[in-house]
Image (tube, rainbow, N blue to C red):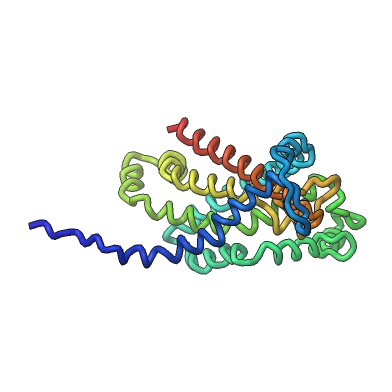
């Protein structure tokens, strides 16, 4: 006899706090920001409706396009070494003969729990032109004869910002890769070993293909997070000719420094569109290779 399913409405009471909180602190601000994007508002006077003027301005805003390019360059420079380092270390730490693997996993994950502001300040002090420890070490080793002004070079500035992001997030991807590796059955490797496959071939033809869903997850999350870079680049500065100014930094400077909240809201929705487009391209590209 099939028991009757209890369709009591009490369950709605348990999920209501989430939806109430999301509605107040999430949905309403999103809708209000969308409303502000059609107005002219400096935060002090009443908003004045201007229609699509802000969006027209955004489409012709060369600074916004520059920030898109800066964000993409920094993201690529950080995600490539980040995934390579995380994957290599995950494969090594997944081996049974490695001792202290839990200690190393904790150590590598530690930078992820440090705030980006702290990392930005730390790296800005390390690479300071006059008092930075990096210049002092290089001069003591005889590699350079005088201090290097790292942040006066566009590519060195981007490299430092990318290094901060790579160092912060490779530990998170390391844990994700280890979880993916542990989900692969040992029987698959044993069968490959019986067929004469060595460690390199097992990694190339078994491990990497079976980690494809994990690669997709880490790549999509890195696209979403990488295009919203703000904290670390803000602490390290804009770089020469604004070469390290990201999209969210442009949003912050427009809204909270120039007090142009309406155009800042428009920039926010422009960032949303860019993130959605690149995320959709990433997901579509992953399906084409299936």
Where does the N terminus fall, quadrant-wise? Answer: bottom left
Can the viewer see residue 107 in this picture?
yes
* 261 or 222, nearer to the observer: 261
Tag count: 0
Point out the residue furthest to the top here. Answer: 288
Q: In this view, does 14 lie above or below 267?
A: below
Q: Where does the image place residue 60, in percent across and percent down from the top left? A: 77, 34
- Left or right position of 85 against 186: right
- Left or right position of 15 against 175: left
Residue drawn at 45 percent across, 42 percent down = 212
Where does the C terminus fall, quadrant-wise? Answer: top left
Q: Is residue 37 above or below residue 45?
A: above
- Left or right position of 285 against 80: left
Point out the residue furthest to the left here. Answer: 1
Residue drawn at 88 percent across, 59 percent down = 129
Q: Where does the image place residue 283, in percent across and percent down from the top left? A: 50, 38
- Left or right position of 289 against 127: left
* 155 or 99, nearer to the observer: 155
In which quarter of the view is residue 196 placed?
top left
Q: In this view, does 197 lie above or below 175?
A: above
Residue drawn at 35 percent across, 42 percent down = 192
Q: Where does the image place residue 12, in percent across and percent down from the top left? A: 35, 63
Q: Where does the image place residue 149, in percent across and percent down from the top left? A: 88, 54
Can the viewer see residue 198 in this picture?
no
């Amino acid at each position: 006899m099939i028991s009757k399913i209890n369709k009591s409405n009490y369950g709605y009471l348990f999920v209501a706090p989430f939806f109430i909180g999301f509605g107040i602190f999430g949905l309403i601000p999103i809708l209000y920001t969308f409303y502000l994007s059609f107005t002219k508002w400096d935060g002090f006077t009443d908003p004045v409706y201007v229609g699509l003027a802000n969006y027209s301005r955004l489409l012709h805003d060369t600074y916004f396009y520059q920030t898109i390019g800066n964000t993409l360059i920094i993201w690529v420079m950080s995600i490539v070494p980040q995934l390579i380092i995380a994957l290599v270390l995950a494969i090594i730490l997944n081996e049974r003969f490695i001792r202290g693997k839990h200690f190393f996993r904790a150590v590598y994950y530690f930078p992820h729990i440090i705030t980006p502001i702290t990392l930005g300040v730390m790296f800005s002090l390390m690479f300071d032109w006059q008092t930075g420890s990096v210049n002092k070490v290089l001069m003591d080793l005889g590699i350079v004869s005088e201090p290097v002004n790292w942040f006066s070079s566009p590519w060195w500035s981007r490299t430092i910002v990318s290094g901060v992001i790579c160092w912060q997030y490779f530990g998170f991807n390391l844990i994700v890769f280890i979880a993916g590796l542990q989900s692969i059955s040992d029987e698959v490797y044993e069968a490959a070993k019986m067929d004469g496959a060595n460690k390199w071939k097992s990694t190339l033809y078994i491990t990497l293909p079976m980690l494809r869903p994990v690669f997709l997850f880490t790549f999509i999350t890195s696209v979403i997070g990488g295009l919203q870079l703000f904290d670390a680049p803000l602490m390290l500065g804009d770089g020469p000719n604004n070469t390290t100014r990201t999209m969210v930094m442009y949003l912050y400077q427009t809204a909270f420094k120039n007090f142009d909240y309406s155009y800042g809201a428009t920039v926010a929705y422009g960032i949303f569109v860019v993130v959605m487009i690149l995320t959709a391209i990433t997901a579509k590209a992953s399906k084409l290779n299936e």
